[in-house]
Amino acid sequence: DAFKVHPGEQDKDGYGHVGFNCTDPVASCAGLEAKGVVFKKKVDEEPMKGMAFALDPDGYCVEVVKRSANAPFSNEFNFSQTMLRIKDPSKTLPFYERLGLTCVRQKPTSA
């Protein structure tokens, strides 16, 4: 089997994680855990208290964070964001912009 998962947490991995918002991360994460979801970081753990990172079946991180009080959603979870680690923003950002996406924030890191 040549397939290999790169969960975005190892050196040189490009993928970061996807994120979902919910009204009450503590209650929502407890419900997910009761259904067998495994967490890399629970909502009450340091660092970054208030957000959790669940692991999908392939080991990819899924962020769960509190949504703003005025968000127009009634379902428990809504898709929030995708975080990507990219090599060259001058090449990669225009690609995703052509797909209709908008870069909301950039955080340069050392190579």
Image (tube, grey):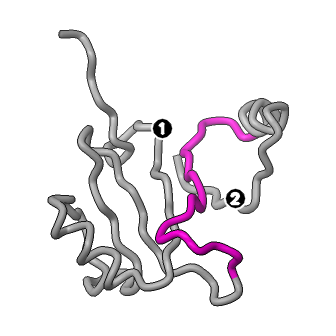
Q: Secondary structure at mark 1?
A: loop
Dot 2 alpha-carbon crowd within 10 angstroms: few under 14, some 14 to 19, many 20 or more: few
Give the camera-side residue of 97 and 56.
56
Q: Amino acid at mark 2?
A: Gln
The total of numbered circles placed on residues is 2
Residue at position x 32%, y 83% in the image: 27
Q: Left or right: where does residue 56 sit relative to residue 94? A: left
What residue lies at 32% left-to-right and 85% top-to-bottom?
A: 26
Callout 2: SS: loop
- The disc at residue 14 is 1
Q: Quadrant of the N terminus?
A: top left
Residue 32 against residue 97 in the figure, above or below: below
Task: Give the residues in magenta.
Answer: 71-89
Q: Which residue is mark 2?
A: 106
Residue 2: give x, y in percent of width and height. 24, 10
Decide: is 52 above or below 94. Answer: below
User: In terms of sequence position, does the residue under pointer 2 or pointer 1 come before the other?
Assistant: 1
